[in-house]
Image: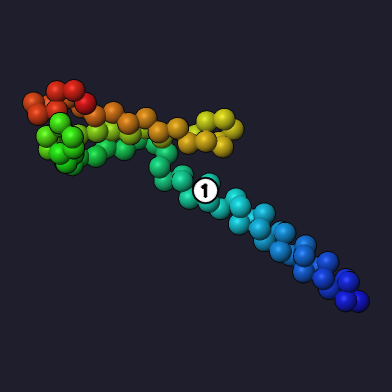
Amino acid sequence: MRLRTILTLALLVIATAAIAADDPIHQLDILGGKWQCKGTAYAFADMPEHPIVATTNGTWILGKSWLEIEYREMKNAKNKMP
């Protein structure tokens, strides 16, 4: 009886872990698709602070195992080499 209880609990723990392992990947779904952002890139090294306008495009690849995110900044008067 005791062995049966231990095996049942072990199976329950394994099943719970398997279900929990699926959740983190689905939390990234919000990053898929197209997004736009505006903001400020702060000064760093020899690059002065400047405004940015950018877009991102998130696509699931390799059997929906990896999320590929493409980031593109737009040129403007203060950001000539995005």
Q: Is residue 65 left or right of residue 34?
A: right
Q: Is residue 43 left or right of residue 11?
A: left
Residue 67: x and y in percent read 48, 36
Identity of the residue furthest to the right in this view: 1
Residue 9: x and y in percent read 77, 69
Q: Which residue is mark 1?
A: 26
Q: Is residue 50 left or right of residue 6?
A: left
Which image quadrant for residue 34?
A: top left
Please identify the quadrant where the N terminus is shown. bottom right
Which image quadrant for residue 68?
A: top left
Relative to 20, say whether 5 is above or below.
Answer: below
Which image quadrant for residue 54?
A: top left
Residue 64: x and y in percent read 55, 36
Please identify the quadrant where the C terminus is shown. top left
Foreground: 23 or 43?
43
Identity of the residue furthest to the left in this view: 77
Identity of the residue furthest to the front in this view: 45
* Crowding at mark 1 (Cα within 10 Å: few <14, some 14-19, many 20+): few
